[in-house]
Amino acid sequence: MSIRDKIHRGWDDHADDAAGVWATLAELDPATPGELFQLAALTAHVGGDHLGDWTGALARLDALRTHAHFDRDSDEGRGVRRLMASLHLCAGDPTSADAAIADAATEHQPEPMVRARVLAVSASAWCGHRQVNQATKALDQAVELAGEQPPAAVARALAVTANNLAADLAEQDVRSPTEEGLMLRAAVMSRRYWAMVGTWENLRIAEVRLAECHLAARQPQTARMHVQNALALVDAHGGTEGDRFFALVAGVRVHRALEAHTEADALLARARDAVAHTTDGMRPWCEKALADLG
């Protein structure tokens, strides 16, 4: 198995076995700058977001900066320094975070834009550890720094981070009112930023996320509207039945919440048929989603 395959496997497995993936990552030796950055990103996410070992994750990223394939002036090199800045922030060391942010800035991506990306990633990490006030403050600062029309790289980073934050909160069995508000706001943010820089597929995913979050917030009527939006995007762009799958799954849950069981059963039948049209890599996720529906 190649390094890239092992990293992809790590992303697949880390939610269920963060400690096991953390141990595996220590053994990987990247062969390109791209692999080095991918390894750094997964290391920061697992060590920080999941295990809360900010110091350990920083030590591993610091070691990667001495690796033969680390190029400090490349996009990947600056990406590693952004990851380190976020880890420093979460570890309570804003001075070191400021230094890493300044070091990652360029003429084309000045310090405020770098800081916006770092704050967005930090917000997601803090949210994962139920530090909602910190997460909310960081997200507010990131949005303010990004402005109304941020550069594409910044908008994309905010879209991805907001989606992940919303997903993490939606999956929690219990949320405080503050967490619920942050969940809905993050889902709206993801849709907004994907509208700036994403494809229709990104917008479809964002609409499904909005449906899931509104359903988690006990707002099934609004959730149904977002399911309809997602399905309409597939229709408008000539998507496949596989593209409809997760919108159909969300629709089943929404209609069950509305006690519209005939509609829910019809959508479930469509979702079962749609699995055959998904890619091989996605099929296990789809089958699990169907199993969860019962």
Image (tube, grey):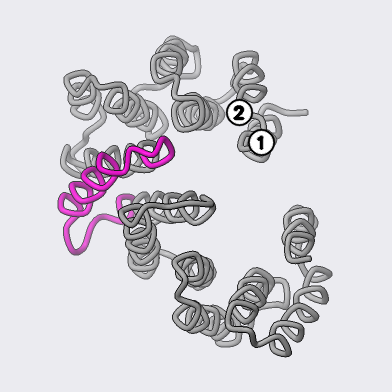
SS state under label 1: loop
| Quadrant of the frame with the N terminus | top right
Task: Decide if residue 213 is on the left or right side of residue 248.
Answer: left
Q: Tell which of 136 and 114 is nearer to you.
A: 136
Q: Dot 2 corresponds to which residue?
A: 18
Task: Decide if residue 135 is on the left or right side of residue 257.
Answer: left
| Quadrant of the frame with the C terminus | bottom right
SS state under label 2: helix
Q: Residues within 10 Å of mark 2 (few under 14, many from 20)?
A: some
Displayed quadrant of residue 27: top right
Q: Dot 1 corresponds to which residue?
A: 16
- Circles 1 and 2, Cβ within 8 Å, touching? The answer is no
Q: Tell which of 113 and 175 is nearer to you.
A: 175
**Looking at numbered disc 2 in the image, what kind of residue is underneath it?**
Ala
Displayed quadrant of residue 6: top right
Task: Decide if residue 123 is on the left or right side of residue 280.
Answer: left
Residue 224 pos. (x, y %)? 52, 82
Find the distance from the CA under tag 1 to the CA under tag 2. 6 Å
Magenta-tinted stretch: 127-156
**Looking at numbered disc 1 in the image, what kind of residue is underneath it?**
Asp
